[in-house]
Image: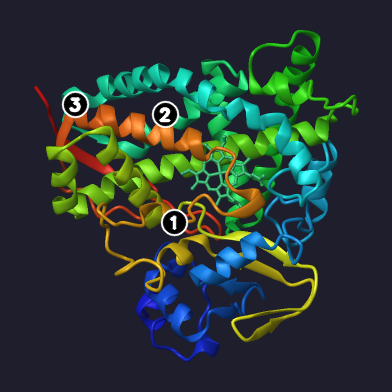
Amino acid sequence: MENVVEKAETCPLTELSPMHPELLKCPYGMNRRLQREAPVFQDPLSGIFLISRYDDVVAMAMDHKTFSSVMPGGGTGSLASPDHEIAAIMEQGYPNVSTMLTQDPPLQRRYRKFVDGAFSPANLKALEPFIEQLSNQFIDDFIDDGQCEFLGAFGIPLPLTIIASQLGVPTSDLPLLRKWTDAFIGNLSQQLDRDGQLNAARDILEFQHYFVEKMEERRAHAEDDILSKVVNASIDGEKPLDNAECLSMISQILVAGNETTSAALTEGMWLLINNPDQYQLVRQDPSPEMINALVEEILRITSPSANMFRRTTRDVEVAGVTIPENSVCFARFAAANQDDERFEDALKFDITRTNLRDHVAFGKGVHHCLGAALSRREMNGGFQVIFQRLENFRLTPGAGEPEFSANALLHGLTGLQLAFDKIG
Ligand code: HEM
């Protein structure tokens, strides 16, 4: 069988299809090639312009007037119009409207104002004991086995439980939140077949009905959670957000709050297995400073939010290429974080870099991640407990190499069979 990943490093550029599932899983060699030879490259399959150099991606993220985040389809991730059957399912729910991630200033800022406070330093500080307690609880469940599937046993439940508590959703409904997250992610992946799209539409409809009911409850009795903040949000006497706007914001917080942090935690463990010298550095000195450096380097290398959509509002020249008005582009945050021009020997996992925090894993400019501080705290707290209780990480004997999922926007492992020794 042809090796698409190797071929991508040498084939004529006219034959390169960056949306090939194998290249979405393993884009590293291709990214370097694009940075060198085609920093602005129009994908022949999708027509999307891929922008891959650090400086260009940052400039693009800072110029929201030229690179709009409002996409056709209200930011569902789907560029094609839904077919008749899918449209009929969607009609039973609420329309997709553009809010924070999928909106431009000044409206984008207005939506963000309602939730920014939920992630204030004081609120995050108050979450620390909860993060520690949950991390210990998940580890208790598998520590005596000497092994676990880390994504399912720790990577997913930690951010999911925390975001559920922040939203105000009971723990008994965590499986539902997970199912709905998968439906949104499936749409974003651009890889669903028709049955997959139908199922995703049904699950998203279920998500909408569930949350509209919860929203009604919070309108009647506000509680100290994000859901109450969103539904009762009104600044300077403006009319409160309607159901479609609230659902859009909740879905963004739910999806962004889960998948990305799960991916970074899990690939972080894989990086520690593959880089024993770096693991030894943290093992010998598991201080908050060292764990913080580890977290930043994990964020840079993993960049779970690998690509984000933008649409040009005018003809614009980037790296000598004119991108026509109304073109769909990708701000390639993961490729930017692997740019040798910015990070020396960029593919090397090195927690002693002096410019660790220059990474753009959380984006840049007006859309800079709402949950960056929350996610950093979850990762720092999670790794702290992991290093207190587990050591000598390795792949479970007999388990194959972990695999990445094929997703046009998000990058992460499908699982990690982890073996370890128990400390003490
Ligand atoms: C490792 C974890 C995370 C990564 C890598 C990540 C990455 C990103 C990136 C790259 C953006 C900018 C998107 C753009 O420019 O179009 C973004 C925005 C956003 N993130 Fe995160 N994120 C993470 C965790 C979270 C968490 C925990 C939350 C929820 C609380 C969250 C909520 C959001 C929201 C709502 C936006 C849109 C903000 C806006 O457009 O105003 N993210 N994130």
Q: Position of residue 51 (x, y in %)?
A: 57, 72
Q: Position of residue 216 (x, y in %)?
A: 79, 16
Dot 3: element: helix
Q: Position of residue 106 (x, y in %)?
A: 80, 47
Q: Which residue is mark 1?
A: 359
Q: Is residue 254 above or below residue 312?
A: above
Dot 2: element: helix
| Outermost front residue | 354
| Outermost left residue | 424
Q: Is residue 281 left or right of residue 184?
A: left
Q: Quadrant of residue 203?
A: top right
Figure disc tally: 3
**Nearest-to-viewer mark from 3 and 1:** 1
Q: Who's the residue at 48% across and 53% down the image?
A: 361
Q: Who's the residue at 70% across and 56% down the image?
A: 78
The reply to whether dot 2 and dot 1 touch (C-beta < 8 Å) is no
Question: Which sits in the foreground, 49 or 1?
Answer: 49
Quadrant containing the C terminus is top left
Observer able to see residue 407:
yes
For residue 367, the mark is none
The reply to whether dot 3 and dot 1 touch (C-beta < 8 Å) is no
Q: Which residue is mark 3?
A: 389
Q: Is residue 240 left or right of residue 396?
A: right
Tell me if the residue at label 2 has its CB under 8 Å from ligand 1.
no
Residue type at tag 2: Leu
Q: Is residue 97 left or right of residue 253?
A: right
Quadrant containing the N terminus is bottom left
Residue type at tag 3: Arg
Label 2 – label 1 distance at C-alpha? 24 Å
